[in-house]
């Protein structure tokens, strides 16, 4: 029986308006009509953007981006009869998107076990939903260059997470267990030692956090040997998917070697090789409103006009409900350790509680206190238990701030514990060399906002978010860094500040315990108290949407342009773009100028080795964390206390923080990094900043010159302390290693050579103070700051800082400060007697 005979035989025109398409879909009864926000966005897309090459679509979490993306693809598929591709950053989101498509009756397909591209996709009969990894890899089934599969339209869901996956697709990592690791160490031994003998020895001894960049000149000189080494293992799984993408572009790659791995990747990923992606006639890049989309310009080559004119819903200013809580600001008693103790063993029965931490080391601290730390392969299974209502212990996830959805009761309490770490060696290097730069701060802010968004996945969803760790609190509250957050997040931080003030008055006036006040606030959101809900709605409705500065957008656009000129052998044009467009117009700090001068020096090396080295000398002079130039003796500039007064230095330091709250946040941030197991770069920086806080002149020769001790404090003109930091050593280590003793002796010799006839105390910060009698320290005045000494010092600093809460910071009294230093055993004489003497075994 052919029911088609009953259909009116008038010409049937296929609908391409996405709103009309939705009306004809065979949706399930639970789907319901399009939301007003979805209708508004689809109307704007169809009227103004459907013929654009690129569109950035920004919507609040939970406003139905997935359905909007699917309808856009269906519209383009019907209009042009070309393949439509929906890309997700991971398989978990692929499955979610497929479920959504089936719910709304949209015809889709997936790549099956045979790993082949479905014919129904290439015939433009169905939308293909898959991961970005399936498209972007060296052995992609979509093909490379002219052999690429034709694709008409693409949706890039969670585009910022996809960018990270694209970078990984171009990044070759060689673990220290691989025989190539030793070959590379031998090949670049001399060049790496010139950059830093001590750091090189740490790498040889597999200290994971020690890292050196292979100088660009050494990389180019040995490029043929590098190619042969990598080609010899091109069939290895860790190499074969990346090798086709970089084998002919090795000269445009950087290389870092750490004690854990080697990292090789292009300065700029050649995304043009994936013409299925670059030649698509219509591409939509979807992201949350909290993200800065500027990096789409550099990483994916989008035009800045696309970034400045996104497709969004102007009627919706905010979505979801977040109560951001900062316990350490409510009361010093609710510090990082106390928060961990309170929440690590928490076992809520009606909702999920999740903690995001930056590293496995930190995750294990939570596990030791009763939490459930899951490795990366078990994350999705554990989250699935929560979504099914199987709650239990606090779930700890390490170094995952995106690609995790924790809607509704699966996460009502989310804990962000300390600042996120860098995922790549390049990002770590950039963080060291460009500390405080806009580029680095935006990346940190974006990672934090990704974390904040994990527990609120819809406009009616709600979650309490505990911010733990002074560095994270300080970043979010500090006016110099908080500006990099979206207006929505800045407003939520403002609400958090008001809750802090209210909580402190409750503690002081009502004499409530800090922990009780914290849980009273939690109850406000978890029990859906109307006073909280009304306050939140009113505060968010009054929010002003302030556009972020697009200064970074110009930098990134010029960086991409310069790198393109360089790869096209247009050296002078590449250098001119960096010099005239960035250094002369967009850079205002010496360290940033040094960073870009090193880029020019790298370009110039292909044109004039002499000129390149001269520019590298200038770069290093401006920024000592950059590569040391070749064949040039870098003279170390000693530090002194001449014409300085310690107490006056302390007063200036405190006043520079603005008020006591900022001063305390800064001190707490420093103290929190002074922990065994913390990132070594952050730990060393904290030791240096602690000296600044205490009014001393400080220096970090190892970071600036890759030689000498990690940190030096000048107490007086003729008295110094120097610190060698071994904080990442396992606390279970029974003794100080032979190579650590040897390295320490080298640094003592270095210090005596550069500082003649002065008194100094050499400190090693390491969990154990025991040393083998076969390998003793050669200096008799060596002191060890070990597992007991370090916490005592931190407590003394905390007590000293707290004294200023009672004082007017504008009229600080010199004698009072001197008295406080004495009370808390922070005089010069006290600091020369920290720690214990080594014990021979």
Image: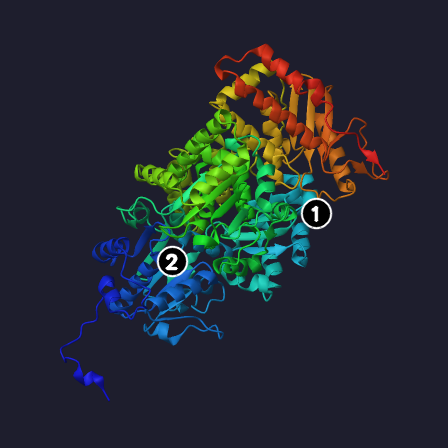
Q: What residue lies at 60% left-to-right and 16% top-to-bottom?
A: 646
Visible in this render: residue 703?
no
Q: Secondary structure at mark 2?
A: strand
Q: Quadrant of residue 640?
A: top right
Q: What residue lies at 56% left-to-right and 34% top-to-bottom?
A: 334
Residue 26 vertical placement versus 7 (above, below): above
Q: Residue 826, image x and y in percent?
A: 66, 20
Residue extending furthest toward the bottom? 1
Q: Residue 739, image x and y in percent?
A: 76, 41
For label 2, the residue is 156
Q: Residue 26, image x and y in percent?
A: 29, 71
Q: In which quadrant is the C terminus drawn?
A: top right
Visible in this render: residue 167?
yes
* Residue 204 tag number: 1
* Residue 674 tag number: none
Q: Quadrant of residue 41?
A: bottom left
> 565 left or right of 435?
left
């Amino acid at each position: 029986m052919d029911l088609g005979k009953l259909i009116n035989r008038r010409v049937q025109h296929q609908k391409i308006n996405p709103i009309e398409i939705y009306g004809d879909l065979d949706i399930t009864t639970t789907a319901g009509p399009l939301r007003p926000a979805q209708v508004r966005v689809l109307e704007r897309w169809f009227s103004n953007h459907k013929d654009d090459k690129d569109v950035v679509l920004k919507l609040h979490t939970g406003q139905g981006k997935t359905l909007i993306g699917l309808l856009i693809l269906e519209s383009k598929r019907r209009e042009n009869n070309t393949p439509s591709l929906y890309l997700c950053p991971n398989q978990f989101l692929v499955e979610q998107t497929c479920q959504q498509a089936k719910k709304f009756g949209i015809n889709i397909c997936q790549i099956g076990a045979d790993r082949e591209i479905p014919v129904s996709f290439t015939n433009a009969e169905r939308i293909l939903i898959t991961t970005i990894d399936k498209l972007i890899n060296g052995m992609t089934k979509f093909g490379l260059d002219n052999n690429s599969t034709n694709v008409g339209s693409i949706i890039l869901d969670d585009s910022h997470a996809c960018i990270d996956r694209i970078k990984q697709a171009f990044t070759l990592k060689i673990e220290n267990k691989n025989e190539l690791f030793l070959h590379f160490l031998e090949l670049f031994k001399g060049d790496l030692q010139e950059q830093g003998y001590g750091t090189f020895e740490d790498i040889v001894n597999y200290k994971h956090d020690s890292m050196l960049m292979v100088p660009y000149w050494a990389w180019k000189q040995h490029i043929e040997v590098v190619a042969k080494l990598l080609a010899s293992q091109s069939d290895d799984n860790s190499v074969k998917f990346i090798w086709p993408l970089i084998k002919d572009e090795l000269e445009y790659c950087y290389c870092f070697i750490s004690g854990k791995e080697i990292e090789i990747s292009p300065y700029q990923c050649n995304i043009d090789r994936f013409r299925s992606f670059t030649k698509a006639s219509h591409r939509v890049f979807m992201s949350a409103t909290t993200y800065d989309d500027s990096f789409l310009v550099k990483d994916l080559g989008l035009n800045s006009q696309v970034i400045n004119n996104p497709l969004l819903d102007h009627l919706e200013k905010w979505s979801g409900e977040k109560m951001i809580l900062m316990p350490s600001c409510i009361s010093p008693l609710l510090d990082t350790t106390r928060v961990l103790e309170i929440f690590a063993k928490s076992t809520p029965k009606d909702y999920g509680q999740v903690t995001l931490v930056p590293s496995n080391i930190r995750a294990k601290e939570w596990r030791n206190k009763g939490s459930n730390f899951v490795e990366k392969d078990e994350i999705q299974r554990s989250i699935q238990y929560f979504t099914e209502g199987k709650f239990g212990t606090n779930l700890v996830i390490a170094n995952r701030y995106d690609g995790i959805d924790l809607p509704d009761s699966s996460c009502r309490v989310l804990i962000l514990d300390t600042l996120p770490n860098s995922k790549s060696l390049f990002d770590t290097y950039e963080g060291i060399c460009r500390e405080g730069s806009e580029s680095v701060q935006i990346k940190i802010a974006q990672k934090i906002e990704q974390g904040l968004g994990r527990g609120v996945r819809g406009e009616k969803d709600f979650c309490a978010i505990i911010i733990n760790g002074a560095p994270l609190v300080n970043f979010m509250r500090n006016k110099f860094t908080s500006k990099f957050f979206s207006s929505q997040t800045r407003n939520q931080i403002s609400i958090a500040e008001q809750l802090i003030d209210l909580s402190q008055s409750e503690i002081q006036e009502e004499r409530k315990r800090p922990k009780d006040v914290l849980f009273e606030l939690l109850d406000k959101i978890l029990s859906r108290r109307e006073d909280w809900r009304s306050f939140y709605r009113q505060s968010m409705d009054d929010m002003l949407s302030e556009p972020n500065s697009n200064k970074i957008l110009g930098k990134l656009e010029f960086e991409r342009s310069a790198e393109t000129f360089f790869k096209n052998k247009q050296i002078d044009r590449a250098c001119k773009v960096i010099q005239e467009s960035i250094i002369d117009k967009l850079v205002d700090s010496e360290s940033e100028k040094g960073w870009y001068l090193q880029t020019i020096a790298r370009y110039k090396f292909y044109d004039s080795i002499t000129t390149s080295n001269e520019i590298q000398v200038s770069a290093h002079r401006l920024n000592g964390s950059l590569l040391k130039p070749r064949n040039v003796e870098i003279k170390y500039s000693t530090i002194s206390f001449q014409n300085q007064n310690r107490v006056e230095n302390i007063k200036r330091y405190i006043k520079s923080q603005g008020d006591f709250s900022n001063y305390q946040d800064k001190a707490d941030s420093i103290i929190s990094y002074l922990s065994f197991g913390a990132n070594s770069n952050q730990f060393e920086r904290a030791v240096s900043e602690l000296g600044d806080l205490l009014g001393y002149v400080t220096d970090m020769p190892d970071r600036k010159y890759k030689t000498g001790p990690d940190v030096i404090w000048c107490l007086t003109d003729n008295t110094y302390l120097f610190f060698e930091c071994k904080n990442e050593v396992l606390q279970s280590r029974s003794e100080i290693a032979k190579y650590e003793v040897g390295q320490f002796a080298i640094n003592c010799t270095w210090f005596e050579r550069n500082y003649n006839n002065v008194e100094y105390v050499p400190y090693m910060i390491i969990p154990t103070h025991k040393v083998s009698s076969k390998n003793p320290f050669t200096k008799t005045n060596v002191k060890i700051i070990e597992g007991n000494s370090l916490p005592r010092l931190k407590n003394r600093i905390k007590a000293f800082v707290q004294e200023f809460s009672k004082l007017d910071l504008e009229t600080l009294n010199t004698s009072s400060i001197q008295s406080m230093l004495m009370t808390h055993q922070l005089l010069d004489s006290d600091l020369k007697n920290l720690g214990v003497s080594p014990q021979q075994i």
